[in-house]
Image (cartoon, grey):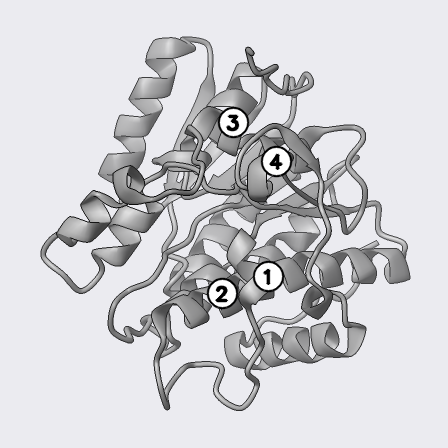
């Protein structure tokens, strides 16, 4: 049976930022947003890879409006520079898509600022970017922020006693914590928006088990190349998987659908919640505790030095 693809609504006149837009779900999101008329900033760490992805999208959609800008989410100075330049160049930002991430480095690695790599790159970097861009986002007529979590968030715990995994590093547990933190970021931002009367739609999504280079690239961190098991992983894995076209749809739905709700979480509708078209899914209970969410937000402010802007409407 042919799968019905999600059609992104008309985005003409809108400006979107997509992090990690050089490959995988980020590239697919940038392509489909641009095909729908958005002007898309592809926010990536390696400019050459971003330009290559831009050329591939333009070959398929010659009229796409795409710009590559550098950001390293593992470097808070780079995040600040990106946000300041974009804010200087643009009157508003309609859509921020927090997509970029790393997964399962085999040994504990650190960001430039000394944070555990997954917590820093997957959560603290996007947190700092989101908060720094809030004035620009809130200047848009109908602003939206969509954040990519993961099914791994279901297994995550926020370990406030050792957020940086300095005692006993476990790759998958650290990844799960970082993606639970992303979901909390989205949920708490929705709460803040409601409390302050902001017209901001903050949503989250997860891609199920989508075949991207996240597993292969992420697990190669600290190695010369991915392990043989990792390279064969999709072939050996008994779980259902899907291509990036379908896997990006929960994120695109969260980012663009007129039916998306504040604080909602979207994911695949098919087998084991790993494949299939996007539907509303239940967030894990650990992502819904307001006290924990507030504590994590305040902790992120302290760690990054980035706080909610004052004076925004």
Mark 3 vs 2, N-terminal side: 2
Q: Residues within 10 Å of mark 3 (few under 14, many from 20)?
A: many
Res 246 label:
3
CB atoms of marks 2 and 1 within 8 Å = yes
Residue 225 visible in image:
yes
Mark 3 vs 1, N-terminal side: 1
Location of residue 68 with respect to 203 vertically, above or below: above
Mark 2 vs 1, N-terminal side: 1
Q: Secondary structure at mark 2?
A: helix
CB atoms of marks 4 and 2 within 8 Å = no
Q: CA distance from mark 3 to mark 4?
A: 8 Å
Res 128 label:
none
Location of residue 313 with respect to 246 vertically, above or below: below
Q: CA distance from mark 3 to mark 2?
A: 22 Å
The image position of residue 128, as x and y in percent, is 54, 63
Give the residue pinned by disc 4.
250
Q: CA distance from mark 3 to mark 1?
A: 21 Å
Give the residue pinned by disc 2.
176
Q: Residues within 10 Å of mark 1 (few under 14, many from 20)?
A: some
Mark 1 vs 4, N-terminal side: 1
Give the residue pinned by disc 1.
154
What residue sits 87% from the left and 60% below the top? 196
């Amino acid at each position: 049976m042919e799968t019905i693809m999600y059609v992104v609504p008309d985005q003409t006149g809108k400006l979107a930022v997509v992090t990690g837009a050089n490959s995988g779900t980020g590239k697919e999101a940038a392509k489909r947003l641009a095909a729908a008329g958005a002007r898309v900033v592809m926010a990536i760490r390696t400019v050459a890879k971003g330009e290559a992805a831009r050329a591939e999208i333009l070959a398929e959609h010659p009229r796409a409006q795409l710009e590559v800008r550098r950001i390293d989410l593992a470097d808070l100075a780079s995040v600040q520079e990106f946000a300041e330049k974009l804010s200087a160049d643009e009157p508003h930002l309609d859509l921020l898509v927090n997509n970029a991430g790393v997964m399962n480095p085999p040994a504990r690695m650190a960001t430039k600022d000394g944070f555990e790599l997954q917590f820093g790159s997957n959560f603290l970097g996007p947190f700092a970017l989101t908060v720094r861009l809030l004035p620009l986002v809130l200047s848009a007529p109908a602003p939206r922020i969509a954040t990519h979590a993961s099914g791994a968030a279901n297994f995550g715990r926020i370990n406030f006693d050792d957020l940086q995994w300095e005692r006993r590093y476990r790759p998958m547990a650290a990844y799960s914590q970082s993606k639970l933190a992303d979901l909390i970021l989205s949920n708490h931002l929705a709460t803040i928006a409601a409390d302050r009367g902001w017209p901001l739609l903050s949503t989250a999504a997860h891609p199920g088990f989508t075949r991207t280079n996240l597993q292969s690239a992420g697990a190669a961190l600290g190695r010369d190349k991915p392990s043989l098991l990792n390279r064969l992983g999709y072939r050996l894995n008994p779980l259902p998987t899907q291509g990036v076209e379908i896997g990006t749809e929960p994120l695109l739905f969260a980012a663009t659908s007129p039916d998306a709700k504040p604080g909602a979480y979207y994911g695949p509708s098919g087998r084991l919640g790993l494949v299939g078209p996007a539907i509303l899914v239940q967030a894990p209970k650990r992502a819904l505790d307001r006290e924990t969410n507030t504590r994590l937000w305040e902790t992120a402010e302290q760690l990054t030095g980035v706080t909610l802007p004052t004076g925004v409407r």
